[in-house]
């Protein structure tokens, strides 16, 4: 499929026609509908009397294909729901847009229409600065070397739900946007573009673009949703036994790469423990060989959150960690180098304490003195900066901090 990567990097999104070949659309719809019925049965089976009816109450019921229990319900009859992700029009295009040879699937989902009208969602960026990094860090890294992750909506039926603000992945909110978002975050924003998708079309976009689910109505909606990166992690691959040999081998390759990335992440963190600056920088280069100085400091902020997660595994009552951060870093997020609780077990309590000593000063620079709020994020008020990275602070400043020579304030 022919794409314009320059346009993608400028606008932050591309609408691509006939991503699903027309002769494959009917079969793909039918197979996804089988999974919808299987998931609905699971929700009904597992629901306690006090639990909400997910299918009946959610404004956007979602299926998570690569998570249990649905992952265990994929079989030969529904294999195409996974294999479409490895089609050249998706995996190949994603690799081109990321500027890599072999982009890997991160999450595979299906977004469905609700059973009653819910209207619009709120404008937002898919970004949680409290457990990842401030928006400025993402912007500078994207400008320097392109995105680390691309996200897809692939429509199985005509879909006009998603709207985006072109170019907003490369800037902070304007004062006018902030004013309107504070007044009504569910109204159209000036300059927004509605992504009119026909059945089989896709829109691929760069996070953290400002976007909007403009209307969750009862109109039939089956939109494949998820993304690609070079960093991924799979906890359940049972369903791959039902896939073609070629696709199974690709998932095996991605799993091996994930193990390698985890080992490199461990080596980088151990270099910090040992105050080995050369090994730390060399490890960052191995993790993200295409990144520059801005990418190095963004990865270091990610590693700061990973260090917090490791410290929390050994000290659940770790002082000074907000509850929201505790909850979020407890879940794996490989794209931002948080590999989850099992990875934390690679470090002893003593090592975890030393690791947090190395990163805690940076964590302090990522916070302000009191809670504040910026609209357009998936978060409420907090002390962590939504937008700003530490001022005049680079990789060498972080390394100098190991010996008490910390800058950036």
Image (cartoon, rainbow, N blue to C red):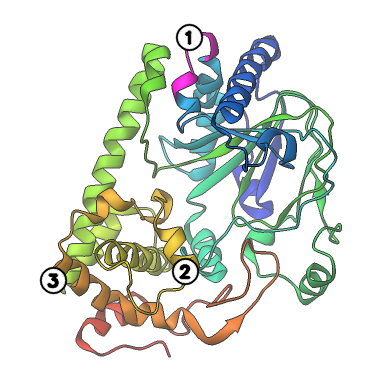
Residue identifier under label 2: 323
What is the C-alpha distance between the residues marked 2 and 3?
Answer: 30 Å
What is the C-alpha distance between the residues marked 2 and 1?
Answer: 43 Å
Magenta region: 72-78
Asked if residue 278 can be seen in this view, the reply is no
Q: Which mark is residue 298?
A: none
**Apparent side of residue 189 relative to residue 352 in the rendered image (left or right):** right
Residue identifier under label 3: 274
Residue 216 x, y percent position in the rendering = 80, 41
Residue 229 x, y percent position in the rendering = 45, 43
Residue identifier under label 1: 76
- Observer-side mark, 1 or 3, equals 1
Tell me the crowding category of disc 2: few under 14, some 14 to 19, or many 20 or more residues within 10 angstroms, Cα based. few
Tell me the crowding category of disc 3: few under 14, some 14 to 19, or many 20 or more residues within 10 angstroms, Cα based. some
- In the image, residue 299 sits, relative to residue 241, either above or below, namely below
Q: Earlier in the sequence, mark 2 or mark 1?
A: 1
Local SS, label 3: loop
Local SS, label 2: helix
Residue shown at 46%/73% (left/top)?
322
Relative to the observer, which residue lies in front, 220 or 336?
220
């Amino acid at each position: 499929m022919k794409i314009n990567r320059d346009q993608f990097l400028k606008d932050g999104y591309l609408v691509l026609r006939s991503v699903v070949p027309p002769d494959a659309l009917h079969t793909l719809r039918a197979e996804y509908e089988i999974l919808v019925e299987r998931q609905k049965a699971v929700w009904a089976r597992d629901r306690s009397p006090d639990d909400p009816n997910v299918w009946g109450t959610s404004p956007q019921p979602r299926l998570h294909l690569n998570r249990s229990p649905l992952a265990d319900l994929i079989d030969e009859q529904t294999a195409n729901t996974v294999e479409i992700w490895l089609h050249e029009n998706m995996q190949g295009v994603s690799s081109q847009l990321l500027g890599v040879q072999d982009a890997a699937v991160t999450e595979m989902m299906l977004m469905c229409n609700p059973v009653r009208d819910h209207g619009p969602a709120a404008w937002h960026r898919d970004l949680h600065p409290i457990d990842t990094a401030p928006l400025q860090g993402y912007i500078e890294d994207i400008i320097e070397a392109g995105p680390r992750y691309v996200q897809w909506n692939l429509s199985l039926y005509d879909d006009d739900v998603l709207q985006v603000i072109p170019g907003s992945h490369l800037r902070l909110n304007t004062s006018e946007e902030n004013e309107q978002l504070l007044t009504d975050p569910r109204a159209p924003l000036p300059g927004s573009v509605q992504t009119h998708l026909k059945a089989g079309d896709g829109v691929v976009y760069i996070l953290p673009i400002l976007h909007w689910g403009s209307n969750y109505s009862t109109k039939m909606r089956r939109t494949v949703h998820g993304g690609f990166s070079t960093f991924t992690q799979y906890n359940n691959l049972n369903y791959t036994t039902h896939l073609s040999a070629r696709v199974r081998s690709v998932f095996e390759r991605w799993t091996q790469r994930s193990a390698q990335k985890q080992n490199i992440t461990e080596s980088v963190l151990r270099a910090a423990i040992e105050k080995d600056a050369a090994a730390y920088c060399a490890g960052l280069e191995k993790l993200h060989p295409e990144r520059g100085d801005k990418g190095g400091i963004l990865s270091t902020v990610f590693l700061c959150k990973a260090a917090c997660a490791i410290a929390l595994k050994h000290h659940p009552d770790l002082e000074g960690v907000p509850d929201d951060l505790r909850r979020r870093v407890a879940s794996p997020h490989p794209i931002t180098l948080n590999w989850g609780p099992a990875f934390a077990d690679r470090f002893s309590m003593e090592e975890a304490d030393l690791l947090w000593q190395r990163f805690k000063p940076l964590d302090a620079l990522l916070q302000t003195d009191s809670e504040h709020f910026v609209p357009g994020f998936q978060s409420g008020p907090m002390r962590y900066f939504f937008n700003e990275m530490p001022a005049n602070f680079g990789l060498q400043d972080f390394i100098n901090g190991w010996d008490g020579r910390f800058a950036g304030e």
